[in-house]
Structure formats: C-alpha cells, structure tokens
Amino acid sequence: MKQISLSLFLLLTLSCGENNETSKVKLMTLDPGHFHAALIQKTSYDEIDAVVDVYAPDGPEVRDFLNKIEGYNSRENNPTNWTIRTHFSENFLDDMIDQKPGNVMVVSGKNSNKIDYILAAVNAGLNVYADKPLVINEEGFKKLEEVFEIAKEKNLLVYDIMTERFEVTTSIQKALSMNVNVFGSLVDGSPSEPAISKVSVHHLSKIVSGKPLVRPAWFLDTDQQGEGIVDVTTHLVDLVQWETFPNQILDRSDVEIISSKRWTTHLGPDQFKKITKLNQYPDYLLKDVESDTLSIYCNGEINYTLKGKHAKVAVIWNYEAPPGTGDTHQSTMRGTKSDLIIKQGEAENYKPTLYVHAKTEQNFETTLNQALATIQNEFPGTSAEKISDLKWKIIIPDVLKIGHEAHFGQVTENYLKYFREGKLPDWEIPNMITKYYTTTKAYQKAFE
C-alpha cells in the first residue's frame, strides 16, 4: 500500500509540474517591424518564459528589435534576462506555425498583413497578443469577426494592446467621471460640442528608449501601415468606449458615424532621410510623391455617436515636436455637474494635466476632495488645487507618471492575468469588435 501511495504521489507531482510548465506563457514574436514589439519586453515577467522565439525575414527591422532587447538586457538598472532564438526565413509565418515553440504570438508590424497573421495563428491554436490596430479596412474587419469566432471555439485569447488606458491622467479622468457627485452624468452633446472628445498629436521623428527612432519606410505607406483614421484613432475610440460606458457590452448598432475626414502630412527628402536613414523613396512610396515631397494620409477625424452620446476623435501627425515637447493628448468629458479636461499645451509645460471645471461652486471643492479621497488606494497622493472660482487642477505625484513606454508592461500584466483566468472580461471582445467597426466604417465614410 505504501508503494502504491508513493507511486501515486510521484505521478501527481509530475503531472502538476507538467501543468505548471505548459501554463507558462511562451512568446513567439512574429516579424517585429514596429518598435512596440520590443517595448513589450522592456520588462521581465515571472509568468513569461525568458526564452523568446523570433520569426522574421532577416533585415534592419528585426535587427533593430534585437538591438533593443540586448539594450534592455545589458542596462545597468533592472536589466532584463531575455534569451532570443531567431528563426530567419521568408516563410517565417509557416515556420512559426509548423514549429510552435510557444503558445502566444506577439505581432507588431505591417498593419496590412496583421489580420492574416492573427487568423493563421488562431487557426493553429495559438493565443494572440497584438499591437494596434488589428485591422485597417472593411475586408480586415470581416476577418477579425472570423478570428473571434475561432478563438471562442478553441478557447484562445486574442487581445490588442491598449496602452492609453494606463495613462494616469486618463485613468483619473475616468474615475472622476464615474463619481455622480462630482461629474453628474455625461451630457448628450452635439457635433459642434461633443460630450466626449479626444485629440492626439504625434510626431514622425521622435526618441524611443533614449535613442532616435528609425522608422521603416513602409510605416509611411498607408497601404501597408493604414491611414491615421484607422491607426492611432483606435486608441481614441477605445478610450471613448472605456470611459463613457465602463464595463458595459457595446454593439455596432450603438454606433452612428456622422462625418469623418482625412488629410495629409508632407515630408521633404531630407526629412524622409532623417526618419528612415534611406537616401531615396522606395518604389512603393512614389505614388504619394510629387515634386520630391511625400504626402501621407496619416491624419484623420471622426464625429460619431455612441449610444446617443456625441463623440469626436482626431489624430494629427507632425514631422517633429518642438524642443522640449513631444506627443500630446487632449481630452474633454462634459458632465451635468462638471467638465473633466486634459490639456497638454505650453501652459502645462507639455505634460498631460487634468482640470475639473465645475458648473456651480456650491460645496464643490468639498465634494471633489471627498471624491479624491476615495481613489487614494489606486492613486495615492492625488489632490486638487483651486485655480479659480470654478476650476481646479488635479495634482498627481510624479511617481504615478511612469510614461508611455512603461505602459506596455502594465498592459502585459493585464494580459497575463487574463491568461491565468482563461478568459477576457465579458465586455472586452464585443467592444473590440465595436471599436474596429467604428474606425473602418469611418474610413469608408471619409471617401464619400
């Protein structure tokens, strides 16, 4: 009997060991053409295997990815411990699916191919952790619907990386909007005065991880990258849904596109060379070149309603930020008792700053301070500074302002939580579908 018990114990121990091993996340990074792929690995995670397999064609893009990972591994403070196994070939997708050394595919690169990679991955039984946007047109949206059907059948996680949910001023804006004593309820708004609006300004020339970013030339080709109205606006549409109807399931029938528009940013040859380190435009960009000037449809604006609430999102791409500045974000939520406004201009020293504009002064400061007291566990040290009779600035401790690059670690921790639980929140998938319906439908409307 003792021998049988010992044998059973050993069997159970081995089984548990196998389950722990298989439950660990093992990443496979596919064709990392965008620097966001590297930012996922700027941090080490106990639940992610330190060995990562990279499948890609050999070239400057994957070499840049590998250099960034090596930089994270060799830095003096909090170095990471990644071991990269490279698999270079032109058939990188087929090789990854045939070999499957991991259980989660990371994809961050050409948006034109992304949905096909995701569809192939879920068909092969792989989970997906993808940089935005998952799709850039109506054809891609139809494939995305298929992806989620397959993922549901196979119990797989498909998740897009929404870093902006973790920007602290946005998080506090959301928290205060959910306090009826401070905010009241969201007004319906109008096209000229939307209930919620978000404007994001980005720059083609920028610094990432302390070094000038070299962008692949295809990033400037909207056929491969997608236009601005379906790229960065993905974040803004996501925030509209996340803040306006938190934890609620949304459907495409809740969306009505009122108007949308697109316009270009122009680059000269010297600017193009600085961004890409290339001496001339590749052939696929010549369709957008006139008199040596490259014109890119990377700007877009969408005016729409979500469950009857008027919303506006806009993305603007400039060549380079003025000295001492960077990408900026502005956001307004208009309530019956106050407006919550994020600004990031010169007056704010180009740092995102949240203001509360009360509709009436009566006891409002007390009410606001009481509301801030309720969120101290999540946002410790946050306070309000009165700057006029009806206006307060929210003072956020610097320790909470960790920056865009660090948000990738926070999103990844979220993904790991869902991986452990074996599912996403009930609202996440339908809201992803609604989000990409909004961007692709607005893209269509911009041509009308």
Image: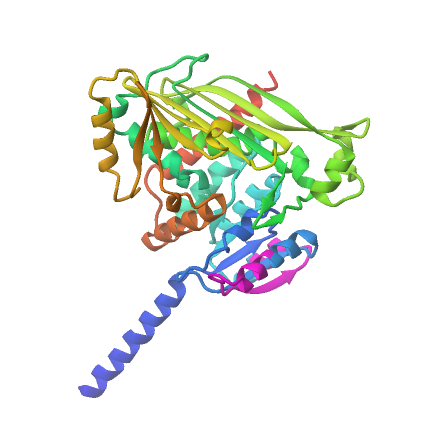
Where does the magenta region start and end?
68-96
Front residue of 331/440: it is 331
Colouring: rainbow
**As drawn, is 248 to the left or to the right of 366?**
right
Query: In terms of image quadrants, where is residue 177?
Result: top left
Q: Residue lying at the far left in this picture: please name it.
A: 1
Q: How many marks?
A: 0
Q: Position of residue 22 (x, y in %)?
A: 40, 64
Residue 157 can be seen, yes or no = no
Q: Position of residue 238 (x, y in %)?
A: 43, 33
Q: Is residue 280 magenta?
A: no
Establish if 143 lies above or below 412: above
Front residue of 209/163: it is 209
Q: Position of residue 47 (x, y in %)?
A: 39, 61
Residue 399 can be seen, yes or no = yes
Front residue of 234/200: it is 200
Residue at 66 percent across and 44 percent down: it is 215
Establish if 240 lies above or below 55: above
Q: Is residue 91 magenta?
A: yes
Q: Position of residue 105 (x, y in %)?
A: 51, 53
Q: Quadrant of the N terminus?
A: bottom left
Q: Quadrant of the C terminus?
A: top right
Front residue of 336/301: it is 336
